[in-house]
Structure formats: C-alpha cells, structure tokens
Amino acid sequence: MKTGKFYKPFTLFFALITILSCVKSDDYDVPNTEIIAPDIDPNSVIEISSLRSLLLQEQTNTENPDAILTLEETNKYITGYVISSDEGGNFFEELIIQNSSSNPNTGVKILLDANPLFTSFEFGRRVYVKLDGLTVGFNSGVLTLGIRDGTNINKIAESAIFDFLIRDVDVASIEALPITILDFSDDKTNLFVRLTDVQFDRHDALGDNRKTFAAEPGDQFDGERKLESCATGYSVIFSTSTYADFKAVLLPDGSGYMDAILTYDFYGENFNITVSDPSTIHFESEERCDPAEIDCGLAETTGTNILFSDFFETQSPGDPISGNGWTNYIEAGSEQWEAFTSTGSSPSLGISARMQAYNSGDSSNIAWLITPKINFDAQEGETLNFKTSNSFADGSTLELFISTDWDGNPDNIISATWDILSAAYITQDSDAFGNWFPSGNVDLDCIEGSAYIALKYVGSGDEAFDGTYEFDEIVINSD
C-alpha cells in the first residue's frame, strides 16, 4: 500500500492548522474590499466612439471589413457604465458598457472569462478599461473588446480581468434612451434603450399556446419572439438565452414599454432586443393593438368558378403592377409592387409580383397591392389560393388583409378597416431561401358583403428591414 504519500501532506496540514489556531484574530487584517476612486489622468481617457473610429479606420486602411485592431502603448482608457447583468442568466461571460448614464451614443461589449460578473460589476457601475493589450473588433455585429486570438477576439482571462477593468466608486441610475425600431442603427447597438407602445406578437403571447421566453421545444440556444410596435407596425426579434433563469416564464400578454439592450443576432445580420431579466418589461396595459382577425379556416375543396385570378404573365418586368383591377398604392417611401422575372437562386414563377425596400434609401416603406372588389353574397364556397417567396425578408413584414368598408379610393386606404385573414400562410424569413410556399386553400365563405383583399408590405431602406417578398398565382374560386 502506498500510504506514505498520504501521511506527509496530512501532517503538514495539521501542523499548519495548529499554528494558525494560536494566532489571535486581531493579529492580521481583514482584506479591504472598499472600492477606491481610480487615479486616472482625464487626458488619457478617450470616448468609446473614438475606439469605434479607430477600428473603422483600420478596416479602411487594410481594405478588410473584418479586420480587428490590437492596441499597444497607447496609454489610453475608455470609461462607461455597466448596462448588462448576468444575474438572470441571459448574459454569459460578457459585460456591456455605454459611454453615459443618460443620452448615451455608443457602447462596447467586453468578453471576460469569468462568471458571475454582476457581483463585481453591477448595473450602473462606472468602470475604466485599460486599452493596451486589448483587441477591438466587431463580434456578432457589435463593437467588442477582448484578447486577440489569430483573427478572432477571445475572452480576457479571469486572472487578468482587474489588470484591464478598474471599478469606480460611481454607481449611476441609468436612464434608458428613448428610441423607435426605425431608429435602430449600428452605432446604437450596445445601448440601454426604451421602446414604448410595444407588444409581443399575438401568435406568441395570446391563446392556449401562449409561449414562454425561451422554453419551447423548438428553441435552440435562443428563444426568438417577435416584438412589434403599435405606433409604426414595425417589428424586431426579442431574444432570450435558453440558459436564462426566466426562460420558462410566459410572455406578457399586454402592451407597454420595455427597457432593453439593442444588439444583433449571433450572425450579426439582424437587430435583436434583449433584457437582463423581465423586470425591465413594463407591459401593464391590457389593451393591445392587434388587428381584428377573420378566420374561416381552410376549405377541404375548391370550387371550379373563378372569380378573380392573376399569374402576372402580361405584366412587364421592372414596371409597377397594374391593370386587372389591381390597386398598387405607396403609403410610405418610394417603392411599390412591381413585376419581375428571375431564373437565379430566387427564381420567379415566370413573371411574378415583387416588393422590396432594398436600396430604397427610405426611412420607411409601406406598400399595398389590393384586388378588385369581390361580392361575397353573389355565390357560395369562396376560396383563396396564392404563393409567396422571399429573398431574405430580414425585418420586413408581409401580411394579408381584407376590408369591407374601403370605398375603392386610394386616398382612403389608411382610414379604412383592414382585418387580417389569419388562415393564409405567408412565407417567413426562416423559410428556405427562394422556395415558393402555398397559402393553403383559404376559406372565404364566412365573409358577407363586398370586400377587397390586400397584401401590405412594411420595411425600410435600412439593411435590417429591407427584405424582399414575391407573390404569384392568386386565384379566388367559388362553387
């Protein structure tokens, strides 16, 4: 038996305990955990926005949009206020700071190989970051600091965290920056923002299948829920980690305001909104801005009488959709539904109708394509069929509406009542790129009187909202 290797360390350990037990408690000092204001020359502190500018200049000089920049011998610091917290499990080994406690204009994410962080870097704590030895780049689309690892940015080792991060005594009350979804931009990421008059999409927040933040069977890594603005109709993805402590909490079913952090998704492609925990979601109003729904379901059969149809083969590619009773109306921006044809990776069905905000340069694009009036009292068994596709929908939306009170005058489209035909399927951004998806055999037999059916596109020239939708092969049948 190899017992000798056990007795020796045990003997030393016992002797050590004996010696220490003989020392009076007042013979040594308790470690001082008091935070002392750092003595940093104000002239050595630069703005976080200057850090972004240095990176952009490096990318310009190297003609490499993915370049990162390692900082050496600058003797410079940045300072900011902590706006993230990993206490709720929705952030992991990262700290986000912004340049001001109110009216901020830039922020940065710092990668740290340690958790928890909120015990040392609580919400509102002011910190200084020593830049020498750190590398700055765009990680998942947002400005990020860490340690160079080849062409990537890695986390600062736990043992070196306080070599780079210096806590100040100041713990500020953070005022969320008022913003709208249309105001989102790259330089506003990593900021603590406030979105007012918003709600979660009715398909996620209402009904018997009301969703949780991130505990649904299909949630992988993150739960993604649509957050929509009642004022503008625009939406953004609200993201929650599947490791968050509150992942199984049901989404709030009301409306109100939310204080959150603006960021990008994992791929750095689409804007996301996220929170440290649900305490900053204030949906206290029971009133929602959902449009009324008309849902006759899906019909089992399709009649042989055609009330209206269009495969757009008589349209001229590049020209606005016209004729055959269509109303092609621009509510906002400069783009409208046009005919297009393509045999590429996103092929058309011959000639199809397309709406996109790509390269529009507009802050808002809203476009309607409305059928001629259909008298639903003149026959029975009406059904609707069509197909849609997208060339990356991004944050833009396409919805199908019906109105029984629009008078046919384009000037009155916005003031008319438009209800959603919820049974129809319209392609989603998550659908396979370039594929065409059928609407389903949408039953219209529950509709009374005369009505118009409309497609409504909402997007903008911003790359996060400049999606493209294609539409074709619409047929309205009856018995």
Image (tube, rainbow, N blue to C red):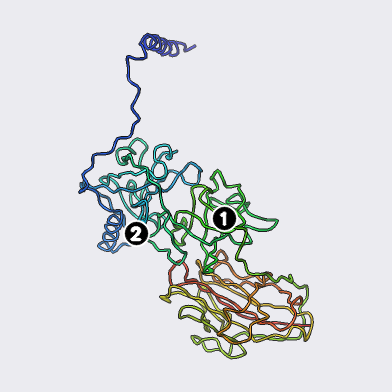
Q: Amino acid at mark 2?
A: Asp
Q: Position of residue 331 (x, y in %)?
A: 51, 79
Distance in Å between CA atoms under marks 1 and 2: 39 Å
The answer to whether residue 358 is above or below residue 62 is below
Q: Position of residue 217 (x, y in %)?
A: 63, 51
Name the residue that disc number 2 marks.
Answer: 66
Residue at (43, 77) in percent of width and height? 360
Name the residue that disc number 1 marks.
Answer: 283
The answer to whether residue 110 is above or below residue 471 is above
Callout 2 secondary element: loop
Q: Amino acid at mark 1?
A: Phe
Residue at (45, 38) in percent of width and height? 116
Dot 2 crowding, Cα within 10 Å, few <14, some 14–19, many 20+: some
Earlier-in-chain disc, 1 versus 2: 2
Residue at (58, 80) in percent of width and height? 349
Q: Position of residue 151 (x, y in %)?
A: 34, 52
The answer to whether residue 360 is above or below residue 120 is below
